[in-house]
Amino acid sequence: MSQRFHVFSLPPDLLDTLTPRNLITNRTPKREPSPPPVTAKEQASTGARTCNVCLGAAFADVDEQRSHFHSDWHRYNVKIRLKGGNPVSESVFAQLVEGLEDSLSGSASDDESAEESDAVDTLVTRVRRNVLSDNPEEGTPKVPISAVIWFHSPPATQIGTYRMLFPLETPPSAYLSELKEMQTPIEGGRKWAMFMVAGGHFAGAIVRVSRAAEEEALAPVNARKKPPKPKPETLVIKHKTFHRYTTRRKQGGSQSINDNAKGAAISAGAILRRYGEQALRDDIRSLLQDWAEDIHDCERIWIRASVSNRRIFLDYEGCVINKGDDRLRTFPFPTRRPTQSELSRCLLELTQVKISHFTEEDLRAQDEAFLASLPRPKPQPTPVSTADIEKPKPQRLTKEEEIYREKWSRLLDMITKGRLDPLKSFWEREAESIGGVNVAIPEWIGDRRASLLQVAAQSGHEEIVRWLLYDLRADPTVSVSARWTKADDAGGDSDTSDVPSSRRTAYDLARSRAVRDVLRRCAADHPDWWDWFGAARVPSGLSKEKEEERDDKRKQRRKGLKERMRERDEMLRSKAAEEASEVTTPEPLETHQESRGGPQRLGGSSGRADGIIGLTSEMRAKVERERRARAAEARLALLSGQARR
């Protein structure tokens, strides 16, 4: 069983042999000589026949430049820059090569290029390791700060204490001196205040964690008598626990947090939980006020609470513990429900040092394995100053240009939305400033269409198209630019899927038959205005006669369709009547004809046959019994009538 030590009463012989353990400072790898800094002269040469990687090395001709690109010096600089290092000059590279055991050019192997490549990689690796060792902040992986600080005692003993026991902002080099300072007894002993609150449960205590100085100096009066039993190192002076209903069962979270997130609930349980939170807050603050003198004498104040519950102890009017108190600590390990036993466990965990027994070789192996498991940070790229990046400044428009662009925006908006009357009045005022009806749409608008007629045709407004063609004589032969693709016209109902994407006129862009008819009528009415059937790509003109003929054909087609529909309905009705006539009624059950002179069944034969058709055997038996009963009643009535006579 290993011996346990109290953090405030370590054995002096063990304390004198302790040394701090540090993973970074313990490593002493071999370091290659660092390359000297690059001079400004070596960086000055630039030009077409220079190497920007190798510090601007200049060359007399192209052949010399090509041979340089295949040299070891250039390949080394390329690889070292990719790994975040700095390139070196040719003289410095020669010094680095001399430090290698095998020269880059002294290989007698058949595969000389492979060994040279391996030698360059080895040199890059060694120099990179040297850079990491010289710049631990940049290249060394960041070792996570552990909660426990370890000290080593030769040959094979290690003790660990929690970092939170030491004063805040204590440098690593001063941990050992602080640990030795903790062994000095003080008057009245060291006191701690420990508080826990979670889920409506509270536990608090004032504990003494080291014996007082007067107890240490106390000596027995009579040497023959047995010395008195020493008092324990830790002693609970005051303690208190209580509980309030503040959280819903199996749902967690305080009522105040739920109210802040979802609004104040109005249930009876919510009211009780709010009252419990307020009562818990008042009880804790009242307890702190009662323990104010003891808390003032405490060396450390340990608080386990959530962000919302932490406000109970701090930052209120008349608070006992100030928010910026340097004695405040949090428990550096997981804790359970706040109870008195949990406080005792946490006190034992904080005051007892951790002990391990590893040799120096085992410790070194553990350190190397731990450092190898840590991810190495990526080299940070050199920051580029914002002054070197010239951002294109947006072109500032003059007042006239802004007015001109606003006019174009209004014009295209009216055409797209089909507002003919405002368009006519606008065109009367601004036709000259716009440039006429056939002016090309400016490129800064970002519209793929080339003319106003194309915009109106694709928007599907036949009145605006008619006004542009007849009144303003817009040019229908203007074709859209080659930027237009077949996918841009997707969704239209025009039959222009075979039109080349580099040439589309207003007729090709029309999305409705009405707009195309307007173009065809204008071509028929004014064939001499434009090249309608060539450049405008209008298939044919649409005169009044052709339009009337088309309407007649459409009417006849509709009339024939109606007649065919009528004939089909009559056929269906006749077919339904025939099917109905072919339906036969079920034949009645076979009845036996009996002679008039012989005995006849009760109820008659016709009634019998009609009443039992479609019935089951049981139902037929019931009907038969009913008939027989009625016949018997009739016979009795007949006999009673004859007796009266």
Image (tube, rainbow, N blue to C red):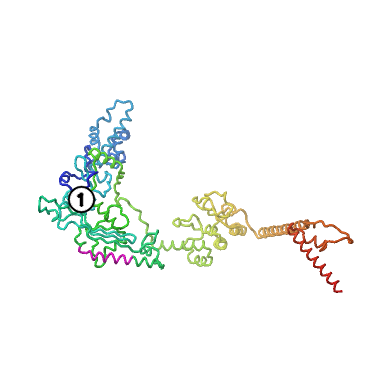
Front residue of this view, candidates 545 and 20 = 20
557 relative position to 258: left or right: right
Magenta segment's dominant SS is helix
Q: Quadrant of the N terminus?
A: top left
Question: Residue visible at 35% across and 67% down?
Answer: 275
Q: Residues within 10 Å of mark 1 (few under 14, many from 20)?
A: many
614 relative position to 79: left or right: right
Q: Quadrant of the C terminus?
A: bottom right
Tell me if residue 26 is in the magenta stretch: no
Residue 73, picture quadrant: top left
The answer to whether residue 50 shows anywhere in this view is no
Identity of the residue furthest to the bottom in this view: 645
Tell me if residue 290 is in the magenta stretch: yes
Identity of the residue furthest to the right in this view: 597
Residue 603, picture quadrant: bottom right
Front residue of this view, candidates 277 and 427 = 277
Q: How many marks?
A: 1
Tell me residue 400's x, y (percent): 40, 63
Residue 529, picture quadrant: bottom right
Q: Which residue is mark 1?
A: 7
Tell me residue 232's x, y (percent): 20, 53
**Mark 1 residue element:** loop
The kind of residue tagged 1 is: Val
Tell me residue 312's x, y (percent): 29, 63
Tell me residue 323's x, y (percent): 25, 61
The answer to whether residue 39 shows anywhere in this view is yes
Front residue of this view, candidates 271 and 348 = 348
Front residue of this view, candidates 441 and 470 = 441
Residues rendered magenta in the picture = 277-293
